[in-house]
Structure formats: C-alpha cells, structure tokens
C-alpha cells in the first residue's frame, strides 16, 4: 500500500464535498472492487460466526446479535472493534 493522500486516490468534486457537508453522508460508487467486497463479506461472516451468528442460518442464530450490541440490539449497531 502506498502513502498517497486520499484525495489522490479518490478525488471528490466540489459538489460531492458540498453534498457531504449538507447531508452528512456521501455515496461514492466503485470505491471497492467486487473482489474486495467479497473478501470483506467473508471476513464479516467469519467474525459473526465466532459470536454464534451464522449468516446461512439467521433464523436460528440471530438472537446472538443482541449480545454484540450495547443498545441491546436497537439501532442496528454491533459493537465489534478491530477484529482479526
């Protein structure tokens, strides 16, 4: 990996920057390749499996998600920080 500035790798237009400042979110297409996305999904599935959640059997394992949330499952946020 190089030490390039993020602006060199993913330059944003002034309109995109303004949209982010206005809306607080910006969707940028094609930042990750399909292969990178597949690797990230596999990593997420493996991390969830370590906590008893099986993405292929969510009906029987989803109740384990509650243990990963400091808000007891409300809000859709999981407290998983820096997994291997």
Image: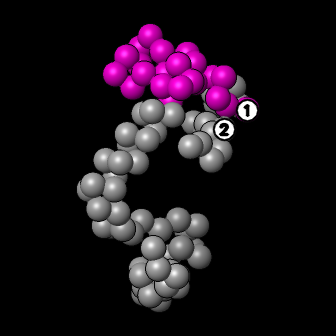
Q: Which residues are magenta?
A: 48-70
At a point 44% along the width and 87% down the height, the residue shown is 8
Label 1: how many residues lie within 10 Å, few (<14), some (14-19) or many (20+)? few
Q: Determine which quarter of the picture holds residue 71.
A: top right
Q: In the rendered structure, does residue 40 fall within the stretch colored magenta?
A: no
Residue 35, visible in the rendered structure: yes
Horizontal placement of 51 versus 32: left or right? right
Q: Are marks 1 and 2 in contact (CB under 8 Å)?
A: yes
Dot 1 or dot 2, earlier in sequence: 1
Question: How far is disc 1 from disc 2 in space, using C-alphas?
Answer: 7 Å
Q: Position of residue 17 (x, y in %)?
A: 51, 81
As rendered, which of 71 and 43 lies closer to the eye?
43
Q: Which circle, 1 or 2, is nearer the viewer?
A: 2
Q: Position of residue 6 (x, y in %)?
A: 50, 80
Secondary element type, mark 1? loop
Q: Which residue is mark 2?
A: 79
Q: How many marks?
A: 2
Horizontal placement of 30 versus 74: left or right? left
Q: Determine which quarter of the picture holds residue 64.
A: top right
Q: Is residue 42 above or below residue 5?
A: above
As rendered, which of 30 and 15 lies closer to the eye?
30
At a point 42% along the width and 33% down the height, the residue shown is 45
Q: Which residue is mark 1?
A: 70
The quadrant of the image that shows the C terminus is top right
As rendered, which of 1 and 35 lies closer to the eye?
1
């Amino acid at each position: 990996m190089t030490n390039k500035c993020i602006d060199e790798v993913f330059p944003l237009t002034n309109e995109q920057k303004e949209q982010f400042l206005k809306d607080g979110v910006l969707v940028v297409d094609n930042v990750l390749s399909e292969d990178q996305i597949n690797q990230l999904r596999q990593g997420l599935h493996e991390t969830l499996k370590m906590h008893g959640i099986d993405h292929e059997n969510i009906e029987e394992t989803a109740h384990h998600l509650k243990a990963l949330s400091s808000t007891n499952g409300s809000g859709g946020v999981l407290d998983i920080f820096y997994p291997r």
